[in-house]
Image (cartoon, coloured by chain):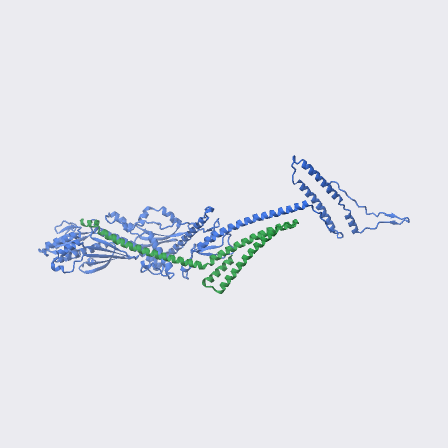
Chain colours: A blue, B green
């Protein structure tokens, strides 16, 4: 309102004389009732001033508009000023009306009969319509933005789920996927897990406890892709090694595949998502396979542990720790089986001492058998006697694998042809078998080296290997064949009446078999070698069979071979009609003068030039007393002559010379 | 989702041993429930969108316009919610497929078993062949070595 405020004052509630009549009667106005008073008060409100004011304001606006149009180029008034002023005025009028309506409503006698709105002008109608339209359009635009955002979020969610479930379905092709039925699941984790524990392997007694790695939880990475996170050094692997007095073969390294310890999040660019998904799934497969192998290695170690501590197994346990078992398999030879983290194994490969590599696994076929120095012989003896640690580890895993996955399931398997006579179906039996196999391998390597040494120094011997395909038995044959040239000469030298006789034996063999740690020799055509120790070597058997130990093996072999040569020479002498006597390593001829001319074989495994040397001795009937005083080492004695390391053809010619000396024979 | 997964595992276990009537009935009921959900969600989306389109009409009273603005927000939210519900349904179906697709899984497992058995047999035969060849080579090499000039000349040396 303006500054002027008109007020109307009621008359004082004093009865005022309205009129006086001539007779003096005073007439007062009638009392107005309460309701009539209120009505009269209301009617006194005059809004004419507002109407007049509105008209004046409209005139003013028109004048201002005119002036503004004239002066619009110079000044720029605030564009919303008029609107603000109009709003203020409207607010004031509205306040008055509201007060009036409240007063009217408070007065029960008077009610608002009706309110008529002034008819809006066309431009006002259009303005309202425009405002409404603009408002609604803005609403729709906001809705559009909202829909776009929602669509984008849903598309991302669909893509993430598609990647996740696609990878999960691919994993499920090879692994057992399970789900936790837990209500409170962390956001982004639906409770999927992969179970690596094979329930079908074990009986109801639950021989094996599930490893901590048996259940692996599937998580989401930052991109929503499937991820498996394992703590570092959670994957272990089995480690096998030898410990001996000679070679300090410490914890060597066995096969360690280069796999990942934890899955790396694919941080590829968005345009290579499909490639990273494949790689992600592949990496997950590799990781799960590594965990699977870890579980298997732990099972193997547990069985080894159980077999070792089993008192009925008969194994000699020399050390046992949390993840380490040491067993003694022979004099001064121990093996250890341990479980180490795979990361440690990977590092150990790089930093391994080359000396350990040499001492670990040098196969025996690399052995140079042509020329052999003694020092080299000793060092090679120590080096080549141990089998390869990796092969032993593989063998250990294989025999336990067959037990765990084959026999426990009662399912036939086709790889048992290589190992007939598999031991008892329990862990301790398997471990005993494994230890016996290792000790056998070590002993057989030593036996082979001894045989090679012997064959190397005796030119007319052949060594033939016979692979047995059995882990605890090995066999060789030392073969001696008389050269055809000698046989031809022999056949020409025979007397006619003897030529119809059976031909002289020209092939001799000596079989060496090793079963576990027992060496068994089987030879033909020689007196019983064991009779040598019993001072009765006259027993002649077509085939001898006896056991010996490693230290005596070279001597026994050489004696066997020498006796076979003596036998051959004896038969050749008989073939030309000369009577000769055969002793263990001696072929004797009796001369006309009563002297005994003997061809004696001398065996010495340590002789570098040759293991079998020959001596010619002459004895007469008076030489018995002098025998005890003769110096055996003196090869220049008149009763003894050292002939040297004679080959077979020279031996034969020597024999023929002796025969001619005897004066007998057809020629 | 847990319930759906549980039903899936239970239904899958029944199917694995042979389709019993109860398992078949449970599966049919579940399928029906899923279809109902799908249709509900889709009808929800269509209905709300229809209302949104209908609310485009401009009314005279500003009050009604304001009312319609609030209604539009509500309809849009309901549409987004229905879409999210459909996506969750799809996730449930995928999980059901993971835990109930025994036929294809068994076939795949059998196929892999066959492949690995074949591979094992092949490896065994390969190992046997390698062993036989090694034995034959060893025998041949031994024969050659011991009959070689090196050994025969060695025999001539005293």
Determine whether, in the image, residue A611 is placed left or right of residue A136.
left
Q: Residue furthest left?
A: A593
Residue at image point 60% right, 47% down: A137
Where residue B73 appears, x then y in whole percent? 59, 50
B153 and A367: which one is in front?
B153
Give the position of the C terminus of chain A as an image quadrant. Answer: bottom left
Residue A89 drawn at (x, y percent): 70, 43
Q: Residue A282: where, in percent of width, then height?
A: 42, 51
Residue that extends furthest to the bottom in the rendered view of this protein: B21
Question: Left or right: A614 with respect to A416?
Answer: left
- Of residues A74 and A629, the one nearer the viewer is A74
Q: Is residue A253 above or below residue A577?
A: above
Nearer to me, A544 or A623:
A544
Specify the quadrant of the image occupied by residue A586: bottom left
Q: Residue furthest front?
A: A122
Tell me, yes or no, if residue B4 can be seen here. Answer: yes
Residue A236 placement (x, y as % from top left): 40, 52
Residue A443 visible here: no
- In the displayed image of the protein, which residue is found farthest to the right? A23
What is the number of callouts on the image? Answer: 0
For the N terminus of chain A, the quadrant is top right
């Amino acid at each position: 309102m303006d500054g002027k405020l008109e007020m109307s004052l009621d008359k004082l509630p004093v009865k005022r004389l309205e009129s006086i009549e001539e007779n003096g009667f005073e007439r007062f106005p009638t009392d107005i009732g309460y309701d009539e008073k209120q009505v009269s008060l209301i009617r006194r409100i005059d809004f004419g001033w507002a109407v007049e004011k509105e008209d004046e304001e409209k005139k003013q606006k028109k004048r201002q508009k005119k002036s503004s149009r004239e002066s619009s180029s110079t000044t720029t008034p605030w564009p919303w000023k008029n609107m603000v002023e109009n709003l203020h005025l409207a607010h004031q009028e509205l306040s008055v009306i509201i007060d009036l309506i409240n007063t009217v409503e408070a007065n029960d006698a008077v009610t608002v009969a009706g309110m008529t709105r002034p008819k809006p002008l066309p431009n006002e109608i259009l303005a309202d319509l425009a405002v409404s339209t603009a408002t609604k359009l803005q609403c729709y635009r906001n809705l559009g933005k909202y829909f776009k955002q929602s669509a984008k979020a849903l598309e991302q969610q669909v893509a993430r789920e598609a990647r996740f479930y696609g990878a999960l379905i691919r994993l499920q092709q090879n692994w057992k996927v399970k789900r936790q039925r837990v209500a409170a699941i962390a956001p982004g984790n639906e409770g999927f897990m992969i179970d690596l524990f094979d329930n079908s392997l074990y009986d109801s007694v639950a021989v094996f406890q599930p490893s901590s790695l048996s259940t692996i939880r599937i998580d989401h990475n930052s991109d929503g892709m499937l991820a498996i996170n394992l703590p570092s050094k959670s994957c272990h692997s089995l480690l096998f090694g030898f410990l001996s007095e000679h070679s300090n073969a410490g914890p060597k390294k066995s096969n360690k595949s280069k796999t990942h310890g934890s899955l790396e999040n694919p941080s590829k660019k968005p345009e290579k998502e499909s490639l990273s998904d494949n790689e992600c799934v592949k990496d997950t497969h590799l990781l799960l396979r590594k965990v699977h192998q870890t579980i298997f290695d732990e099972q193997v170690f547990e069985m080894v542990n159980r077999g070792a501590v089993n008192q009925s197994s008969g194994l000699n346990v020399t050390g046992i720790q949390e993840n380490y078992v040491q067993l003694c398999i022979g004099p001064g030879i121990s093996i250890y089986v341990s479980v180490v983290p795979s990361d440690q194994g990977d590092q150990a490969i790089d930093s391994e001492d080359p000396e350990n590599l040499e001492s670990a696994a040098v196969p025996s076929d690399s052995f140079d058998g042509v020329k052999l120095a003694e020092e080299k012989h000793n060092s090679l003896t120590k080096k080549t006697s141990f089998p390869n640690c990796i092969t032993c580890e593989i063998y250990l895993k294989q025999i336990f694998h067959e037990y765990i996955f084959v026999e426990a399931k009662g399912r036939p398997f086709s790889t048992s042809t290589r190992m007939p006579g598999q031991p008892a179906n329990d862990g301790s039996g398997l471990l005993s078998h494994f230890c016996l196999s290792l000790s056998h391998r070590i002993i057989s390597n030593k036996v082979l080296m001894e045989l090679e040494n012997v064959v190397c120094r005796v030119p007319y011997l052949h060594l033939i290997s016979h692979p047995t395909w059995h882990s605890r038995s090995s066999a060789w044959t030392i073969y001696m064949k008389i050269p055809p040239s000698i046989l031809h000469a022999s056949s020409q030298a025979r007397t006619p009446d003897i030529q119809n006789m059976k031909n002289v034996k020209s092939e001799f063999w000596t079989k060496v078999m090793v079963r576990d740690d027992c060496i068994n020799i089987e030879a033909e055509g020689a007196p019983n070698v064991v009779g040598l120790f019993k001072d009765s070597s006259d027993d002649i058997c077509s085939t001898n069979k006896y056991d010996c130990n490693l230290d005596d093996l070279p001597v026994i072999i050489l004696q066997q071979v020498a006796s076979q040569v003596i036998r051959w020479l004896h038969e050749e002498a008989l073939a030309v009609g000369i009577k000769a006597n055969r002793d263990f390593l001696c072929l004797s001829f009796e001369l006309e003068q009563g002297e005994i001319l003997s061809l004696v074989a001398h065996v010495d495994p340590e002789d570098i030039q040759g293991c079998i040397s020959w001596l010619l001795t002459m004895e007469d009937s008076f030489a018995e007393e002098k025998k005890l005083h003769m110096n055996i080492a003196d090869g220049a004695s008149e009763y003894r002559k050292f002939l040297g390391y004679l080959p077979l053809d020279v031996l034969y010619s020597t024999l023929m010379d002796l025969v001619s000396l005897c004066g007998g024979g057809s020629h | 989702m847990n319930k759906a997964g549980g039903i899936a595992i239970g239904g899958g276990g029944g199917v694995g041993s042979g389709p019993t009537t109860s398992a078949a009935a449970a599966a049919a009921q579940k399928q029906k429930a899923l279809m109902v959900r799908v249709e509900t969600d889709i009808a929800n989306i269509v209905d709300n969108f229809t209302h949104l389109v209908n609310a485009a009409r401009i009314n005279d009273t500003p009050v009604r316009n304001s009312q319609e603005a609030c209604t539009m927000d509500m309809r849009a939210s309901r549409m987004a919610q229905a879409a999210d519900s459909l996506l969750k349904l799809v996730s449930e179906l995928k999980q059901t497929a993971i835990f109930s697709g025994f036929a294809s899984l068994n076939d795949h497992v059998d196929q892999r078993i066959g492949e690995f058995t074949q591979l094992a047999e092949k490896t065994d035969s390969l190992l046997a062949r390698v062993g036989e060849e090694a034995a034959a080579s060893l025998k041949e090499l031994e024969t050659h070595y011991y009959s070689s000039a090196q050994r025969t000349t060695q025999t001539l040396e005293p």
